[in-house]
Amino acid sequence: MKAVKLIIIGIALFLGYATKAQVSVNVNIGPPPQWGPVGYTEVRYYYLPDVEAYYDVQSSMFIYFGDGVWIHRAHLPGRHQHYDLYSGYKVVLSDYRGDRPYDHFKQHKSKYAKGYRHGTQKTYGQNPGKGNHHENNSSNNHSDRKTNNDHGSKNHGGTNTQSKSQGSKQHGHGSDHGEGHGGGKGKK
């Protein structure tokens, strides 16, 4: 009987200690690009006001609106091939948690118009002067994706993500119409 009491007391003490233990969660976002602003290693997204696009540090992909959908690509579109990522201003979205920063595109575009600057930014690497097509420091092999645009609807179901290699060009204009550049599903 004494042994049972000691076991119960031991379990109670253990559970009491275990519930007071502090849990620490560390999310590995990934290394920032060489053109990324210094001091923000825990941030997942930048907004690039000059080209009205986002950069996802975790997937090393640009996210921009084109052909009615939010497109996820390793490079900016051809019209921005000579945009200098090192000297262009990056708005660090340090307060955003989620997979669809473009849900707030209207606010970002309004608050950070083309040409927006808020001080100078130092980058991790030196500007090699090559444009944007070879600036990613990621060796990950990502397929390009298009994300169905629901034009601001908060309906998160029924979105379409397609790989560039699939070759089809669906625009996904279903019943999810609303206003603005909301977005499709930004997850992989």
Image: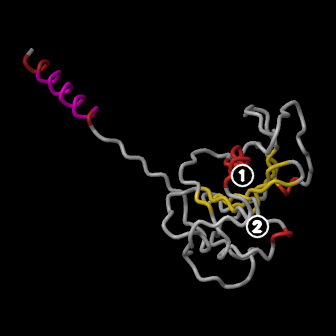
Q: Secondary structure at mark 2?
A: loop
- Residue extending furthest toward the top: 1
Looking at the image, residue 180 lies above or below residue 165: above
Q: Which mark is residue 110?
A: 1
* Color encoding of the figure: secondary structure
Residue drawn at 48 percent across, 67 percent down: 39
Could you say which quadrant of the image residue 171 lies in? top right
Kind of residue indicated by mark 1:
Ser
Residue drawn at 54 percent across, 57 percent down: 43
Q: Nearer the viewer, residue 170 or 85?
A: 85
Q: Is residue 14 magenta?
A: yes
Q: Position of residue 56 (x, y in %)?
A: 65, 58
Q: Is residue 67 left or right of residue 42?
A: right
Q: Position of residue 97 (x, y in %)?
A: 57, 45
Q: Nearer the viewer, residue 85 or 171?
A: 85
Residue drawn at 90 percent across, 52 percent down: 67
| Label 2 to label 1: alpha-carbon separation | 24 Å
Q: Position of residue 142 (x, y in %)?
A: 72, 61
Could you say which quadrant of the image residue 121 lies in? bottom right
The crowding category of the residue bearing disc 2, from other C-alpha atoms within 10 Å (few below 14, some 14 to 19, many at least 20), is: some
The crowding category of the residue bearing disc 1, from other C-alpha atoms within 10 Å (few below 14, some 14 to 19, many at least 20), is: few
Residue corresponding to mark 2: 75
Q: Is residue 149 left or right of residue 8?
A: right
Residue drawn at 67 percent across, 53 percent down: 111
Q: Is residue 43 left or right of residue 134?
A: left
Q: Nearer the viewer, residue 112 or 79?
A: 112
Mark closest to the chain's N terminus, 2 or 1: 2
Where the N terminus falls, by quadrant? top left
Q: Nearer the viewer, mark 2 or mark 1?
A: 1
Q: Secondary structure at mark 1?
A: helix
The magenta span reads 6-19
